[in-house]
Image (cartoon, rainbow, N blue to C red):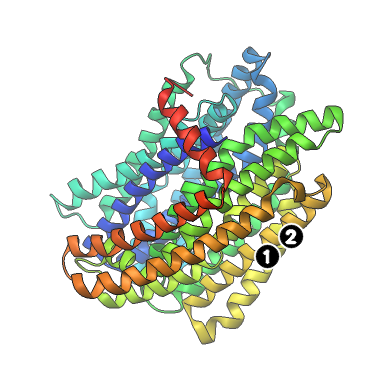
Amino acid sequence: MARTAGLISLGNIASRVMGLAVITIKALFFGAGGAVDAFNVASSIPTMLYDLLIGGMINSSLVPVFIEYVQDRREELWKLVSILLSLTVVVLAVIVLIAELFAPTIVALISGGSSPDVQALATRLFRIMAPVILLISLSGVMTAVLLALKRFKYPAFTGFVLNAGVVIAALVLHGLFGIGITAMAVGLLLGGLFQVALQFPGLRDARLRFHFDLSHPALRRLLILYAPNALALLADVLISRPVSFNLASHTGEGSIAVMDYATRLREMPQGLVAVAISFAALPLLAANAAHQRATGDHLPFRETLARGLRLALTLIIPATVGLFILARPVVALAYERGLFVAHDTELVTRALQLYLIGLPFAAIDLILIFSFYARQDTLTPALIGVVTIAIYLLQSIILLPTLGVFSLILADSCKQILHAAICAIILGRRIGGVGNQRVWRTLGLALIAAAAMGGATYGTLALVEPALGPNGLLARALTVIVPTAAGGAIYLGLATLFRVEDISLLWAALRRRWGANSL
């Protein structure tokens, strides 16, 4: 698991670095004003539709079902994949057409508080990028197949090539020809094409063809597994996210941009740790769950889950502490140039720190959700999701007059905490807990080491920042790098002293991975 997580983390590092390039270019060229609000609204619509139609199926139903065919029914697997890809093309083409026709209405529902000019620009941008819904959905089905086949290296870099398309288009179309933020919409289309093309080599032995057979028995099984998850996604995609965007649009121009800039930075450690470990653990958890159903033995499942939790805690806690302390210099390094000014840095810093409150819980929560999926239980996390979404919206509305856009961010962190706590309690009762798997010991040692790391990071920052000053890319980079290095050394040293086994496990697995030819 650690070896696979290392590979997925490498892909996530590449993706996050390229994603950072996307938002850096966006901040440089367009700042944090209405044009960025329009782009964020327009680009959120394909993401929401993808999450609802395909993204939510990958881990909850596609991967668990595909795994059942991988071992001894490979021909049937390719038939099933052919059917799903054919359905995706036909259904998503119709949805794209409908989205193009009703684009103004869709945009108005999401950003009703924005000015008419912002809404008009968002409509135009959405119509350009709407076909990306089909492209990333095809890529999602291919990703699920490759995960089931344990061919992780191609899916690991889908985020990288998607962001690369945006960067290339922005630099060429706007940097050279000055066409404005439309360049980023075109880039999203280009990135979608890159995603599909990237994964074809991973399916080199596949026998795919256009095949439209709605009677295949696996389709019914997929729908049964996905139906509960669809309930939570409907609440999220059709209620939570549109309402969040709408509320943010009423708090002033640039609020949506502030949320997006902060979210991108929070997603970096989340992607490197939680997403990587969860995707690496899912096939193992699914196999352990099948063993449990056959024998009644919970132990292998508990051991795999505990291993994933320990590894996540060991990495996400110091990442959260370090990023919280270095939030302002990190935001300044990433964004503060061109039209992105010091006032924008302060707003994004505050937003990022509020998001970070919920980050460790979000990391644990993702592993717990995947554990439910591995047990082919999609109903429980879906019901928990609906409840926490309702609480999130209620809290956001209550706090909005006082905190403005920050009410949405604080409510999001509270939602992450609540969802993780409920998932942990319910799953723990069903599998007999993980109390004898050293999870609490790892948590305690990680907190102690992270506290010492935080003190070292803060102290180093207090010394370095005045000496280097706020101006210049090199000075800003060193203001982040030097405290990070000092704090990281303290954390690794204490983790080694405390004999936190998961640190040693990770390094050993990575060394073995780089010494191997393939996964």
Q: Quadrant of residue 197?
A: top left
Residue 25 vs 257, above or below: the answer is: above
Position of the N terminus by quadrant: top right
Q: Which residue is mark 1?
A: 418
Secondary structure under the numbered disc 1 in the rendered image? helix
Gap in angstroms between the C-alphas marked 1 and 2: 6 Å
Crowdedness near tag 2: few (<14), some (14–19) or many (≥20) residues, C-alpha within 10 Å: some
Q: Foreground residue, 431 or 97? A: 431
Q: Of the numbered discs in the image, which one, if any, rests on residue 422? A: 2
Residue farthest toward the right in the current orientation of the protein:
296
Q: Position of residue 499 (x, y in %)?
A: 56, 48
Q: Quadrant of residue 11?
A: top left
Task: Please count the marks in the image.
Answer: 2
Residue 176 seen anywhere in this rendered image of the structure: yes
Q: Position of residue 41 (x, y in %)?
A: 42, 61
Left or right of 469 on screen, residue 209? right
Q: Position of residue 373 (x, y in %)?
A: 70, 41
Secondary structure under the numbered disc 2 in the rendered image? helix
Residue 371 vs 511, above or below: the answer is: below
Q: Of the numbered discs in the image, which one, if any, rests on residue 200? A: none
Query: Mark 1 touching mark 2, by CB under 8 A?
Result: yes
User: For the point 58% across and 20% down, which residue is it?
Assistant: 211
Left or right of 217 on screen, residue 462? left
| Amino acid type at mark 2 | Ile
User: For the point 45% across and 59% down, which residue is it?
Assistant: 266
Q: Foreground residue, 489 or 133? A: 489
Q: Foreground residue, 127 or 361? A: 361
User: For the point 38% across and 51% down, which residue is it?
Assistant: 127
Crowdedness near tag 1: few (<14), some (14–19) or many (≥20) residues, C-alpha within 10 Å: many
User: For the point 59% across and 24% down, which residue is it?
Assistant: 81
Residue farthest toward the left in the current orientation of the protein:
176
